Image: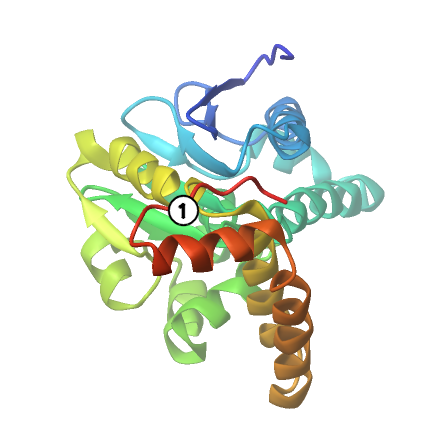
Amino acid sequence: MAEYQNVKYGVQDRVAVIMLNHPPVNAFNAATMSDLEGAFDEATANPDVKVIIITGAGQYAFVAGADLNEVKALAADPTAAHSFIEKGQQVFGKIEASRKPVIAAVNAAAAGGGLELALACHMRIAADNARFGLPEITLGIIPGWGGTQRLVKAVGRAKATEMILTGELITAQDAFRANLVNKVVPANAVVREAMSLAKKIASMGALAIGAALESIDAGAQMSMREGLAQEMSSFTSLVETNDAREGVMAFLEKRKPQFSDN
C-alpha cells in the first residue's frame, strides 16, 4: 500500500476509503490531485476492493475547490492552464468510468472542483450541513473539470444554469430535492452511511456490478436502441457465469448467494 501526502487510504470489508486530507479545506493543488489519482488507481487495481468511497477530512469541506494560488499563476501561462484543466478532467473521467462503484461521502462543503469530483462519482451521500455549488463565475472563470457537463445531467439544464451563472451554493436538502444527492444524513453519520451502502453493493457479484455500470453509462451516451443492445450483450455474457448460476440457485433454495466474482 502506497503512502500519500494529502490523502488517507485504507481498505475494509472490500471497500476502499480515500480521504482527501489537505487542511484546512482540502483544496486541490497538483499534489492533492496526484495523490487522489494514485489512491484511486491503487483501489481500482486491488482485486479485493469492490467499492470505493471518496470523502474529505475535517469539518469544513469535502473539497472547497482548486487551490487559488495555483489558479492565479495560470493567468500568465495558457499552456499551463490547459494542462491544469486537462489533468482534472482526466482524473475525474477515470472515476466516472470506473467499473467499481464510487460513492462520494460529502462531509461538508463541496464547491467548485469539490462538486465536480462528487459529480464524477456514481452516488453521493451528503451530510445535512453540506453545501454544493460552482462559484467559479464569481472569479471571472467557469467550471473546468466537468461541472458544466455533469451538473446538467444530474439536475437538468435550468437548475444547472442557475447554479453555474449565480455561483450560489445550495443546501444538502435542496441538493436532495434536485436529485443531486442520493441521501442526506447527520454530519457524524455520512461516512458510516456511505460504508453501509458500499458493503451492501460489495456483497453482490463483481461481474454483474461492472456490467451494470457499463450499461448505465452506455445508456447515457447512446440511443435507446444502442443502449438496449449493450444491455442484451452484457446480460447474455453474465448468464453463463458461475455467479449467475449461484444467484439463481440461491434464490430457488431460499438462501443468501455466495458470489465468487467469476
Q: In percent of the image, x 46 and y 20: which residue is there?
A: 21
Q: Nearer the viewer, residue 161 or 10?
A: 10
**Residue 172 placement, left or right of 88:** left
Q: Nearer the viewer, residue 199 or 161?
A: 199
Q: Quadrant of the C terminus?
A: top right
Quarter of the rendering containing residue 47: top right
Quarter of the rendering containing residue 185: top left
Residue 46, visible in the rendered structure: yes
Q: Position of residue 129 (x, y in %)?
A: 19, 41
Element class at badge 1: loop
**Residue 97 placement, left or right of 200:** right
Q: Is residue 182 shown above or below 91? A: below
Identify the coloring. rainbow
Residue extending farthest to the left is 186
Quarter of the rendering containing residue 142: bottom right
Q: In percent of the image, x 44 and y 49: which residue is there?
A: 115
Q: Is residue 16 shown above or below 224? A: above
Q: Position of residue 177 (x, y in %)?
A: 23, 67
Total marks shown come to 1
Q: Quadrant of the N terminus?
A: top right
Label 1 crowd bin: few (<14), some (14–19), many (20+), radius 10 Å: some
Q: As shown in the figure, which amino acid type bears the numbered disc 1?
A: Pro
Residue 107, visible in the rendered structure: no
Q: Position of residue 199 (x, y in %)?
A: 36, 37
Q: In percent of the image, x 40 and y 29: which residue is there?
A: 56
Q: Position of residue 59 (x, y in %)?
A: 27, 26
Residue linked to disc 1: 257
Q: In percent of the image, x 45 and y 47: which residue is there?
A: 204
Q: Nearer the viewer, residue 93 or 44?
A: 44
